[in-house]
Amino acid sequence: MNFLEYHDRIKEVLPYLRLKTSYIGGSNQDFSYEASELTNLRNYLNVLEAIPFIEKEVLELKNSWLFNSSAEKQKITSAQSGEVERPINSLRIKLEAFKEIAERSKLYNNDETILIKIPEIQSFDSLAKYVNDFKKAIEIPILDESVGGEVTILSADEGSIILYIALGTMVAVKLVAAICWSAGVIKKKNAEAKIFEQHAKTLELKNDALETFIDAQKAQLKNILEAEANSVATKMYNHNEPETIERLKLSISTVADLIEKGVQILPVSKDEDIQKSFPDYNKMNLIESTIKQLTSQK
């Protein structure tokens, strides 16, 4: 299990993962402590809930008095204090270990690395098909001399298979980001074309008119793919020979198909500009071509 994806969450929460109490004494000795800042503590625990191997402690806390109300402060007994402090201390020990494991990883702060999330697969044939697609989508375009990239598989994780791939240079990472973005545009245009085609069929057009409409849609998609490939070549390469454009068109089309299957290609880098250069795979219907953005800025 690679804890890199949880590192920032753990680092953010650890300093605040404590039960703050003060002794208030008074006549009611059963409730001689006051716990404070409980809202933040609940929120931080909710943030940690998805991290593996801490389910026992989180569940124990969720079943305690801490989550029985939404109060910011609460008078508690010594026993209630221990009921929450014990699992929190256990959580802190585990999370400190997870944080250190992540920071000792060869992937930590490796900005020239991407990760590829693959949906569950059941056979080597399926895996081989993905590997062939990744070669077309990533390895071939980044090996260009003007990019200077190379592919090194660093690690893999369980669940939905995650591959960690070192690309050799930041230029290679930015090229993959550009390809993924263009692929998202193509995926969106393909989806729109299918909707228009289905709508055209409901209009009961004559066969020749329907075929003309479908051919026009295909020509438009072909032109968009050509434009996206040329745009990527202009931004990322120092040349744009026909062979280069054809390779980029293949890469973009392949990534579009992979996205359709549920594959996600993401940066490991925490740099905001790098992260934003990759598409948001949960909002693919909102993606817009960078060609339009460049045009609007002129």
Image (cartoon, grey):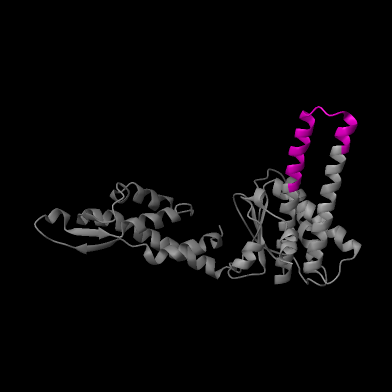
Q: Residue 164 falls in which quadrant of the image?
A: bottom right
Residue 22 shows in the view: yes
Residue 205 in magenta stretch = yes
User: Residue at 33% across / 46% down in the picture?
Assistant: 63
Magenta residues?
A: 189-212
Q: Residue furthest left?
A: 27
Q: Residue at 79%, 56% (x, y): give it.
A: 251
Using residue 251 as the reference point, say whether residue 260 is left or right of it: left
Of 59 and 28, the residue lying toward us: 28
Q: Is the residue 212 above or below the residue 20 in the image? A: above
What predominant SS class does the magenta segment belong to?
helix
Residue 171, quarter of picture: bottom right
For the point 54% across and 70% down, the residue is 104
What percent of the width, then of the height, locates residue 238?
A: 83, 72
Answer left or right for 101 relative to 296.
left
Q: Is residue 280 magenta?
A: no
